[in-house]
Image (cartoon, helix red, strand yellow):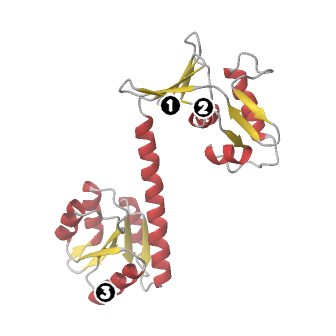
Amino acid sequence: MSAQTILVVEDDAKIRTLLRNVFEAEGFAVLESTRGQSVLDLIRTKRVSLVTLDIHLGSENGLDLARQIRRVSSVPIIMVTGQDDVIDRVAGLEIGADDYITKPFHIREVIARVRSVLRRAAITAEVAHSAAAEEDTKYIFDGMTADPDRLALVDRVGKDCGLTSGDFKLLMVFLKHPKRVLSRDQLMDLTGGREWNPLDRAIDNQVARLRKKIEHDPAEPRLIKTVRGIGYTFSCDVQVLQSSGSSAKSA
């Protein structure tokens, strides 16, 4: 996998060289610029992963350049400001910058902030990709149809099951992992419910509520079965129907 590329926008040659050396030592590829048009051209033509942008670029205004970048790209931006530039820092964040570094800076802080912003950007991109993949995709099981785009489950006679967002999130975890034993910890991780206490009955109560809405007989569940001492398993076949009309059956 190719290295992520950082674009350093800085008119101070010493600081620019320092940042280049630090980033390259950390395994990043580095591009440099001191002018607005050059920055925009590089963002349009290169695979830039992140921009460090000095607010004071000689005759140019870094805030104006940040606005121009945001018109053409969602690339992460870290503003580089002076100690007393509180108003500029706030303005940068309002424009759409992702973070800021204050001069004089410590190299380890720079690296930490860069990696933190890149991690957040990767998570955002993954969520967006997942949402796009889910669009117009339906999950069919036991005569019912789950529609992630509408967060809705329609039962065997075409009636909405009235799932809450929490119910639907848990159902989707089961539909994406059919016939696999999932521990309570895994269910909490996969539903984003890490604030739950694994020692309480929160996940069991959530499963019980979902069973009441999808099982023929919640007292004798056929779909969501308990695996004693471990967690639960979704025992039904799941058909994934995509917008193209193609489908794949999960075993």
- Please tell me whether mark 1 sits on a helix, a strand or a loop: loop
In the depicted structure, whether residue 22 falls above or below residue 217: below
Marker count (numbered): 3
Crowding at dot 3, Cα within 10 Å, few <14 / some 14-19 / many 20+, comes out as some
Question: Left of 212 or right of it: where is 63?
Answer: left
Question: Marks 2 and 1: in contact by CB < 8 Å?
Answer: yes
Q: Which residue is mark 2?
A: 168
Q: Is residue 103 above or below residue 231?
A: below
Q: Earlier in the sequence, mark 3 or mark 2?
A: 3
Query: Which residue is depicted at the point 43% across and 86% down?
Result: 104
Can residue 212 be seen in the rendering of this structure?
A: yes
Residue 66 in which image quadrant? bottom left
From what the image shows, is residue 220 above or below residue 48? above
What residue is rendered at 44% in x and 82% in y?
A: 83
Image quadrant containing the C terminus: top right
Query: Where's residue 190, x and y in %?
Result: 62, 45
**Which residue carries the number 3 mark?**
17
Residue indicated by mark 1 = 148
Quadrant in the rendering for residue 92: bottom left
Residue reaching furthest to the bottom = 14
Q: Nearer the viewer, residue 21 or 241?
A: 241
User: In the rendered view, does 16 fall on the left or right side of 146?
Assistant: left
Task: Name the residue type under label 2.
Answer: Phe
Horizontal side of residue 28 vs 146, given as left or right:
left
